[in-house]
Amino acid sequence: MSRVLAIAPNFKRRLSGVTSTIIQLVPLQAASIGIVTLGPGLPDHLPKMRWWQVPALIKRPAGARFRVWHARRNVEMLGGLILRDVFRAPLKLVFTSASQRAHTGWTRFLIRRMDEVVATSRKTAGYLEVPHSVIMHGIDTGRFHPAEEKAEAVRALGLDPAFRYVGCFGRVRRQKGTDLFVDAMVALLPKHPEWAAVVAGRATAQHKAFEDELRARVAAAGLSDRILFVGEHRDIERWYRALSLFVAPQRWEGFGLTPLEAMASGVPVVAADVGAFSELVEEGETGTVIAPDDLAAMTAAVEDYLRDPERAELHGENGRRHVAARFRLEGEAERLIEIYRRLGGTPQPSM
């Protein structure tokens, strides 16, 4: 514990975007600084401290004035405040905000007591009332990359390589706009027989009726063999590599990594203007951004790509370069480490 300079608490057992961020960032950060996670719901390969080790946070770390407690939820901000202000632990508190809505009074109270606040996008920053920096999420470009041979990537998933595929990935629910995607495909696929569609993601119990209704719409249109519901997959990177177009139709999103995952895989994106999507997609270069909850606009934007596969390929190539230049996961990890070192009073490594 004396060598631990940063703690990434995770006080929520259920998998979420926050959990995924911790899982991706901490191994990269651990190569440069002493960092551990604390809490349930995290894989065993991450460096961890146990609850019985929490009293060790009362002592200063070796070679630094402070440790950094990096919270991403209210409950984790509260935990850091109790350690710092009640038990006088030598901690500096960082909070990352991904919310794009007005904060409650309780959240504002907690945020005002942080030593550093980070927003994940300019939109998110607009809801903050304290000084902050913007550090956007990055993507693992080693995991998400284009297929060497598209037809083989399609065939490996048991799909028909005679088709080009347009995909929509994520939880199947109204908030995610899955119905907008399905309705657009029902309208477009009869006019474009060389294309098919894939919906990848899980419908939880409360959204199962919603998924059943979508499947019924597809069946009524006679398109059950061309609009495929393939469920949830942990190897989702393989499904991105099989696509020629990705659609992010969400009605609301906090940040949203799927456009980055698609572009890193060499796939162009049609995305609703929610979350950070307008800050991720380069209009007319890597895809297009449309108004949220606008079926007509989505259908038109998708059809532009269905009619012009060469444009889709070009924008996919642009997207890969765009992500590699601006949204590498390593870049996000490095910027956070700079904050940890500055707050902790540890020396920056010499160049």
Image: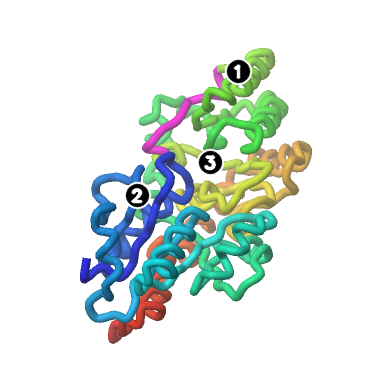
Task: Kindly state the secondary structure of the residue where label 3 is placed.
Answer: loop
Q: Residue furthest front?
A: 86
- At 35% from the left and 54% from the top, the residue drawn is 142
Q: Is residue 223 visible?
A: no
Disc 1 designates what residue? 212
Task: Kindly state the secondary structure of the residue where label 2 is placed.
Answer: loop
Three-letter residue code for mark 3? Ser
- Please provide percent x and percent y for residue 317: 50, 55
Three-letter residue code for mark 1? Asp
Gap between marks 1 and 2, in whole Å? Answer: 36 Å
Task: Using the image as rendered, state which of residue 12 and residue 230 is in the foreground.
Answer: 12
Asked if residue 241 lies left or right of residue 273, the reply is left
Mark with earlier residue (1, 3): 1
Disc 2 designates what residue? 39
Gap between marks 2 and 3, in whole Å? Answer: 39 Å
Disc nearest the viewer among 2 and 3 = 2
Task: Using the image as rendered, state which of residue 257 and residue 147 is in the foreground.
Answer: 257
Are discs 2 and 3 less than 8 Å apart at CB? no
Gap between marks 1 and 3, in whole Å? Answer: 26 Å
- Please provide percent x and percent y for residue 298: 72, 41
Q: Is residue 97 visible?
A: yes
Mark with earlier residue (2, 3): 2
The part of the chain drawn in magenta is: 225-236
Are discs 1 and 3 less than 8 Å apart at CB? no
Task: Kindly state the secondary structure of the residue where label 1 is placed.
Answer: helix
Disc nearest the viewer among 1 and 3 = 1
Mark with earlier residue (1, 2): 2
Asked where in the image residue 233 lies, by quadrant, the reply is top left
- Please tell me whether residue 226 is drawn above or below residue 67 in the rendered image: above
Are discs 1 and 2 less than 8 Å apart at CB? no
Q: In the rendering, which numbered label is found on residue 244? A: 3
